[in-house]
Image (cartoon, rainbow, N blue to C red):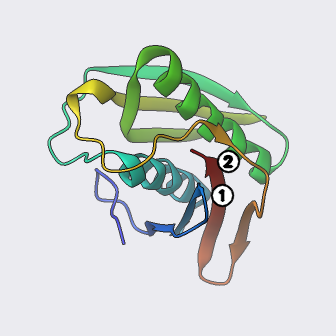
Amino acid sequence: MGRGHLARPGGHRSVPHTADLRVEAWAPTREDCLAHAVRGVAEAFADLGGAAVTRTRDVMIRAERDEELLVALLEEFVYWLDTAGEVPVDVEITPVRGGLQVGFQVADVDALPLIGAVPKAVTLHELAFARGPEGWRCSVTLDV
C-alpha cells in the first residue's frame, strides 16, 4: 500500500486488471482520498522515489457528483501527462463551490524510471467513490 508524498492519512493500491490499470484509494476525507487516487495512478507506472518537482499546475475541476470529480481529476492528470510529459508527484486539493481547486506538483516523466504501462484514458467501468463508516473510498479503471 502506498502513502502520499506528504504525510496524509489513508492509502492506495493498484489492483491487477486485464489490459487496464485499476486503482483503489481510501482516506478519512474526500480530498485525501482523491489525492491518494492521483498518487496511486502515478506510482502504478512511474518510480517516484527520486522525483524532483519542476512546477505546479493549478487547475479548477468542476463537477456535480463525487464520481465525476474523480474522473475529471484523473482526466486532467492524463491530459498533462500526454501533452506536457508531466506526472504528479503530489497534489493539493481544496474544495470550492461546484468543484475543486487543484495544485498538481509535477515532475518530468522523462526523468523518471517507468515501471508500468502509461495511462491513456479514464474509464467509467466499475467506477466508485463514496463515503462509508470508515471514511472515503474510491476505485477507478484507466486504459493503458
**Of marks 1 and 2, the one in the foreground:** 1
Regarding mark 1 in the picture, which secondary structure is present there?
A: strand
Residue 94 picture location, percent across and down: 55, 39
Residue 2 picture location, percent across and down: 34, 65
Q: Are marks 1 and 2 in contact (CB under 8 Å)?
A: yes
Cα–Cα span, label 1 and label 2? 8 Å
Q: Residue at x 39, y 35 (%)?
A: 88
120 vs 104, nearest the viewer: 120
Q: Residues within 10 Å of mark 2 (few under 14, many from 20)?
A: many
Mark found first going from the N terminus, 1 or 2: 2
Q: Residue at x 29, y 51 (%)?
A: 6
**Residue labelled with disc 2:** 70
Say left or right for 33 vs 128: left
85 vs 98, nearest the viewer: 85
Residue 29 picture location, percent across and down: 56, 62
**Residue labelled with disc 1:** 140
